[in-house]
Image (cartoon, rainbow, N blue to C red):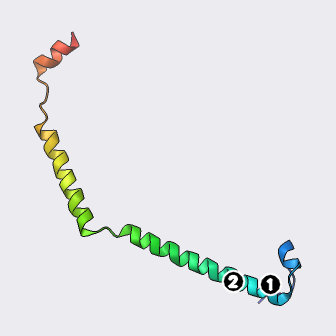
Amino acid sequence: MTQWFSEPSSVAEQALTVEEAKERRERLAKMRSLLFAHEQKAKRLKAIKSKGFHRHAKKAAKMKVQRFHTTPQPTPDFTLCLAR
């Protein structure tokens, strides 16, 4: 196992004492942990869709199909007139 606090690794840590560097690392580790937990929670919440969302999406898809089938399709005679 290596010594984490034996020699400073960055310029900012060179001005700190060993105790201050240790506290700083602990604080940064805690912040990384909190950030990771927050990102995981946001990812989980993003994946969850409500019952209302599914109901609305289903209704919208149904309406889209209905609009497609009720739209009058051009007859072959009409398309020939347009081609001239």
**What amino acid type is highlighted by mark number 1?**
Ala
**Pointers 2 and 1 in contact (CB under 8 A)?**
no
Q: Residues within 10 Å of mark 2 (few under 14, many from 20)?
A: few
Q: Residue 48: name its quadrant.
A: bottom left
Q: Is residue 10 visible?
A: no
| Circle 1 SS class | helix
Q: Is residue 24 above or below residue 47?
A: below
- According to the picture, the residue beneath numbered tag 2 turns out to be 27
Please report whichever mark, 2 or 1, sits nearer to the chain's N-terminal start. Answer: 1
Residue 41 in the image: state x and y as whole percent: 46, 75
Which mark is drawn over residue 21? 1
Left or right: where 2 falls relative to 76: right
Quadrant of the rendering where the C terminus is positioned? top left
Q: Residues within 10 Å of mark 1 (few under 14, many from 20)?
A: some
Relative depth, front residue between 80 and 37: 37
Q: Is residue 45 above or below residue 74?
A: below
In 3D space, how far apart are the residues under numbered discs 2 and 1 (Cα atoms)? 10 Å
Q: Is residue 36 visible?
A: yes
Q: Residue 5: name its quadrant.
A: bottom right
**What amino acid type is highlighted by mark number 2?**
Arg
Residue 6 in the image: state x and y as whole percent: 86, 87
